[in-house]
Image (tube, rainbow, N blue to C red):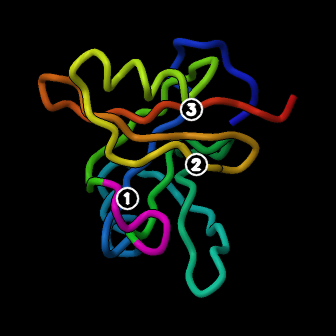
């Protein structure tokens, strides 16, 4: 994730028990190709559109730090301060499913709004 503006969708991914099978599914259904991302003992995947270019989504294993992320397409919306936004989420009737933590050059958390919808919040902290 580069340096998107607060309020914009910076990324999307899907975290599932069997990332290889789901990767293969989306390669067949929408024509994406994939690039492996080394996670140590396994690989997650960046999905690339037909004809190449920048990745458009991630497909990740529900392992380690990702074990508690729900198996659904997750949007990552940029906020100025992920910890403050998580606090405001709780104050406004939402729930924090994954507490703020590091992710690449930033921080993220996963929230559930009062209607039950799930969203990730992302803060770029490479400043």
Q: Residue at x 26, y 56 (%)?
A: 71
Mark 2 sits on what residue? 101
In the orientation shown, which residue stands out farthest toward the right? 127
Mark 1 sits on what residue? 15
Q: How crowded is mark 2: few (under 14 residues within 10 Å), some or many (20 or more)?
A: some
Q: How crowded is mark 1: few (under 14 residues within 10 Å), some or many (20 or more)?
A: many
What count of labels does the image hold? 3
> Pointers 3 and 1 in contact (CB under 8 A)?
no
Mark 3 sits on what residue? 122
Judge depth for marks 3 and 1 and give the one in front: 3
Q: Answer with the quarter of the image where residue 23 lies.
A: bottom left
Rendered-image quadrant of the N terminus? top right
Q: What stretch is highlighted in magenta?
A: 63-69
* SS at mark 2 in the image: strand
Judge depth for marks 2 and 3 and give the one in front: 2
Q: Residues within 10 Å of mark 3 (few under 14, many from 20)?
A: many
Q: Residue at x 37, y 59 (%)?
A: 15
Q: Residue 40 vs residue 82: left or right?
A: right
Q: Sequence order check: which comes first, mark 3 or mark 1?
A: 1
Q: Is residue 109 above or below residue 127?
A: below
Q: Residue 28 vs residue 109: left or right?
A: left
Q: Sequence order check: which comes first, mark 2 or mark 1?
A: 1
Residue 79: where, in percent of width, then height? 57, 20
Rendered-image quadrant of the C terminus? top right
Residue 26: where, in percent of width, then height? 35, 56
Q: Distance between the residues labelled 2 and 1?
A: 17 Å
Q: Sequence order check: which comes first, mark 2 or mark 3?
A: 2
């Amino acid at each position: 994730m580069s340096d998107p503006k607060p309020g914009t969708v910076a990324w999307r991914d899907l975290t599932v028990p069997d990332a290889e099978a789901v990767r293969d599914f989306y390669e067949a259904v929408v024509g994406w190709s994939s690039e492996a991302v080394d996670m140590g003992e396994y690989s997650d995947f960046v999905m690339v559109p037909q004809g190449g270019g920048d990745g458009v989504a991630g497909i990740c294993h529900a392992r380690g730090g990702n074990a508690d992320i729900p198996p659904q397409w997750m949007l990552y919306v940029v906020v100025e301060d992920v910890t403050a936004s998580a606090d405001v989420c709780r104050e406004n009737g939402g729930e924090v499913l994954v507490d703020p933590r590091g992710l690449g050059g930033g921080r993220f958390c996963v929230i559930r709004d009062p209607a039950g919808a799930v969203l990730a919040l992302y803060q770029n902290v490479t400043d």
